[in-house]
């Protein structure tokens, strides 16, 4: 009888140990769950804090994204010399400029971001040429902004001499605007001359068709 009681006590101790072990495992599991949940919440908060920075970065990228324009085109040549030779034989095309794009040289008589404005000046010897302009590859901030600056609705918006705003401009912008407007007061022609000048000096300005 004593032997049986001893076996019962051992069995009871074993069961109690199993229960305690089970409780400990359960507590450990709950603690692990809360630890994982807490870590996930911290990660979510951190991601949300970074979101404004990402949005700001995207805004900067959009600012220097390409802009769509329309050109009044007379022709295209494979060399700058050939384009100059053509203009030399047509002195009436005094406001036509040579615009380099890729390995070609385009003869344009005006540009604007509004197609209707180019339609008004197209003649029997020219046609409308759509193109996209981007300064995203340029290191100079002023050149990055050139596509947006050429979307000005009137000549006064191209002149920053008396502007109170702190605006980053392409090199010698105000001087070039003053010089170009002496030759023409037509907005489409002024924009063209500015584009031709900066495109010839800066390969980072990308013109795509």
Image (cartoon, helix red, strand yellow):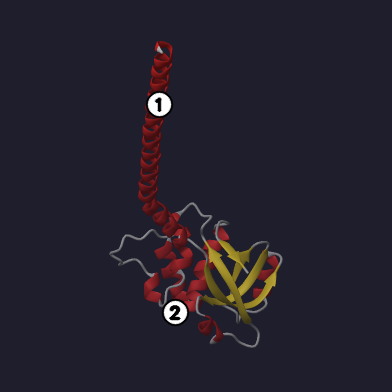
Quadrant in which residue 32 is drawn: top left
Tell me if residue 171 can be seen.
no
Q: CA distance from mark 2 to mark 1?
A: 91 Å
Check the image and report above or below for 12 versus 197.
Answer: above
Q: Quadrant of the N terminus?
A: top left
Check the image and report above or below for 140 versus 155.
Answer: above
Residue 101 vs residue 194, the one in the foreground: 101
Residue 178 vs residue 89, the one in the foreground: 178
Residue 128 vs residue 156, the one in the foreground: 128
Quadrant in which residue 182 is drawn: bottom left
Secondary structure beneath dot 1 equals helix
The location of residue 144, given as percent across then percent down, is 47, 59
The location of residue 105, given as percent across then percent down, is 65, 67
Residue positioned 41% across, 69% down in the render:
178
Mark on residue 185?
A: 2
Few, some or many C-alpha atoms within 10 Å of disc 1 (few <14, some 14-19, many ≥20)? few
Q: Residue furthest top?
A: 2
Q: Quadrant of the C terminus?
A: bottom right
Residue positioned 59% across, 75% down in the render:
130
Residue 1 vs residue 185, the one in the foreground: 1
First along the sequence among labels 2 and 1:
1
Residue positioned 65% across, 84% down in the render:
125
Report the side of 45 relative to 205 (left or right).
Answer: left
The location of residue 111, given as percent across then percent down, is 53, 75
Tell me the residue that label 1 is attached to.
21
Secondary structure beneath dot 2 equals loop
Tell me if residue 180 can be seen.
yes
């Amino acid at each position: 009888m004593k032997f049986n009681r001893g076996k019962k006590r051992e069995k009871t101790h074993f069961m109690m140990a199993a229960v305690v072990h089970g409780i400990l495992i359960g507590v450990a599991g709950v603690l692990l769950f809360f630890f994982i949940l807490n870590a996930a919440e911290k990660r979510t908060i951190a991601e949300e804090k970074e979101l404004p920075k990402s949005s700001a970065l995207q805004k900067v990228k959009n600012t220097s994204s390409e802009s769509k324009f329309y050109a009044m085109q007379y022709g295209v040549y494979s060399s700058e010399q050939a384009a100059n030779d053509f203009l030399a034989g047509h002195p009436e095309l005094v406001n036509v400029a040579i615009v380099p794009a890729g390995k070609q040289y385009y003869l344009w008589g005006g540009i604007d971001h509004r197609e209707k404005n180019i339609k008004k000046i197209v003649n029997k010897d020219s046609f409308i040429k759509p193109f996209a302009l981007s300064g995203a590859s340029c290191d100079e901030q002023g050149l990055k902004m050139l596509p947006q600056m050429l979307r000005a609705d009137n000549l006064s918006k191209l002149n920053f001499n008396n502007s109170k705003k702190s605006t980053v401009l392409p090199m010698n912008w105000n001087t070039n605007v003053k010089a170009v407007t002496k030759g023409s007061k037509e907005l489409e022609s002024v924009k063209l001359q500015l584009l031709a000048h900066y495109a010839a000096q800066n390969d980072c300005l990308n013109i795509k068709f």
